[in-house]
Image (tube, rainbow, N blue to C red):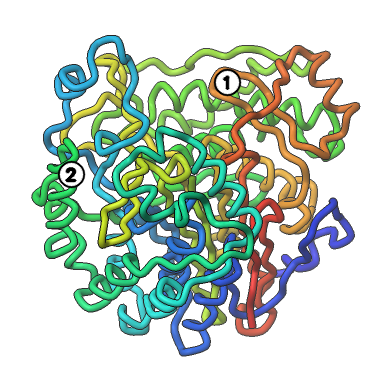
Amino acid sequence: MTAHASFDWTTAYTSRRSPVFARNIVSTSHPLAAQAGLRILQRGGNAIDAAIATAAAMTLVEPCSNGLGSDAFCILWDGQQLHGLNASGWSPAAWTPEYFLAKHGAAEKGMPRRGWDTVTVPGAVGGWMALSARFGQLPFADLLAPAIEIAERGYAVPTIVQQKWAAAAALPELASQPGFAQAFLPHGRAPAVGERFSFPDAARTLRLIAQTRGEAFYRGEIAAALAAHAREHGGAMTADDLAQWAPEWVTPLALDYAGHTLHEIPPNGQGIAAQMALGMLRSLDLPSHPVDGLASQHLQIEAMKLAFADIYRHVADPRAMRVTPAQLLDADYLAARARLIDPGCAQHFGTGLQPEGGTIYLTAADEQGRMVSFIQSNYMGFGSGVVVPGWGISLQNRGHGFSRDPAHANIVAPHKRPFHTIIPAFLTRDGAPQMSFGVMGGDMQPQGHLQTLVRMLDYRQHPQAACDAPRWRVSREGALSLEVGFDPAVAQGLKDLGHRIESFADSYMDYGAGQFIWRLGDPAVEGYVAASDPRRDGQAAGF
């Protein structure tokens, strides 16, 4: 490969980061977690081992984004081929539209935001188990040792994590949830920057997960504690819901763009939205326009809006979808959707096809060529807000992603996976691995995939520059937000084209945060170049 020669290494935006070059790399949004992964690599573990160790550490050092009760997804290159893992949990068997009608009434049209009635089976631990069993090199217990040490000894809370922690702590809907204040408001408040935070309850849980290779979480003492806490607080989760669930190995979806192939996990996640938008841009000659110019930004925004119009209508648990991923990625369909884009006017787009009938991201790579793209999340910051006392398990609120609309493919049902926002991604070239990457942040994720890939593949910006560049974000309602640093002249041009520009009020999700590892050639010789998003506290670290 000559990938190292294809980038413009002079491209730069205001940033605190430089690209990192090494043969073994971990990149994530907290330095201690990146170092946890490196410790495993230095002990003889592989990239999969390192990713698991990093993920476990992240549940402690960035609890405002994920926890032991998270869900997860992964795409990895094992040295020979690509694999996908869906470790998102399913709903309790008791969840039906009638269940929510009886408990929450007809006046409440949507799903609850917090509490036990938003908690689906947590899948992250099961994902770690599956990855280790199939691809791991070191004993599973060894991989959790760095996280256990962090939980017991504690760590000084960094700047951006503290900001997001404090913003969440101010929400009454979180502070009132069982176990939240006890776990995450020591001294009655969020920790200050530089203040030590330890989590001995989580250390206890991690030790039992390590001793039982995760079995206790789904079929043992921890599972019993989860089910008992749910009963005590009016939840529907049972020991059977936990015991019967398992992660699923899946084949990633593929879409060709600019001489490369983008791979995303298939639904119930939204990764297909990035592929759809890129598929539309293939026919619009994006590189003929300046990278930060009005035309390029407008075309990308309109393609993203078209993709969102379809995925918010159609994407759900694949068993319930009435439109297939193949239909959504059909080249003729995407070309037809692209023809709806007006270069001179912003539009509101409806669904095309009609049916027939708070997150962390990490990536790791090793010199043997294995590459891992991994994401796990509690969803809305601290998720459901529920923390199981004595165990330190902070539970996600992915059930909020269901619908109560009987006509929607994503309607809530027993043992069904909800619509998911978290999406790892992977790039190949001519069938060989090129980049493991992801951008966290709710519906910003496919938008981040789109914007960073366009910069790298169409405009030759190196990964850190593509990561640093100011971003735009389209809301579900079609409003456009522009990050600080966006060219004012381009911002005015977008407004003149009819884009409805609004400030973005969500201090947690903001404009996403990405991590990127790009293979430069033979990983044992040329190695990799990695980038880490300056919008978070993290780093890319390697040797």
- Measured as percent of width and height from the top left, residue 78 is found at 43, 71
Amino acid beneath label 1: Arg
The reply to whether residue 322 is visible in this rendering is no
Residue depicted at 68% across the width and 41% down the height: 451
230 sits to left or right of 8: left
Neighbours of disc 2 within 10 Å: few (<14), some (14-19), many (20+)? many
Q: To which residue does mark 1 refer?
A: 337
Q: To which residue does mark 2 refer?
A: 230
Q: Residue furthest left?
A: 240
- Measured as percent of width and height from the top left, residue 462 is found at 77, 58
Quadrant position of residue 97: top left
Q: Closer to us: mark 1 or mark 2?
A: 2
Q: Quadrant of the C terminus?
A: bottom right
- Residue closer to the observer: 173 or 150: 173
- Measured as percent of width and height from the top left, residue 119 is found at 28, 41
- Measured as percent of width and height from the top left, residue 210 is found at 27, 76
Residue depicted at 71% across the width and 50% down the height: 457
Q: Name the secondary structure under disc 2.
A: helix
Neighbours of disc 1 within 10 Å: few (<14), some (14-19), many (20+)? some
476 sits to left or right of 67: right
Amino acid beneath label 2: Ala
Residue depicted at 52% across the width and 87% down the height: 42
393 sits to left or right of 420: left
- Residue closer to the observer: 467 or 275: 467
439 sits to left or right of 321: right
Mark 1–mark 2 distance (CA, rounded to whole Å): 45 Å
Q: Quadrant of the N terminus?
A: bottom right
The correct choice, above or below, for 503 with respect to 287 in the image is above
Q: Residue furthest top?
A: 107
- Residue closer to the observer: 101 or 361: 101
Residue depicted at 16% across the width and 34% down the height: 414
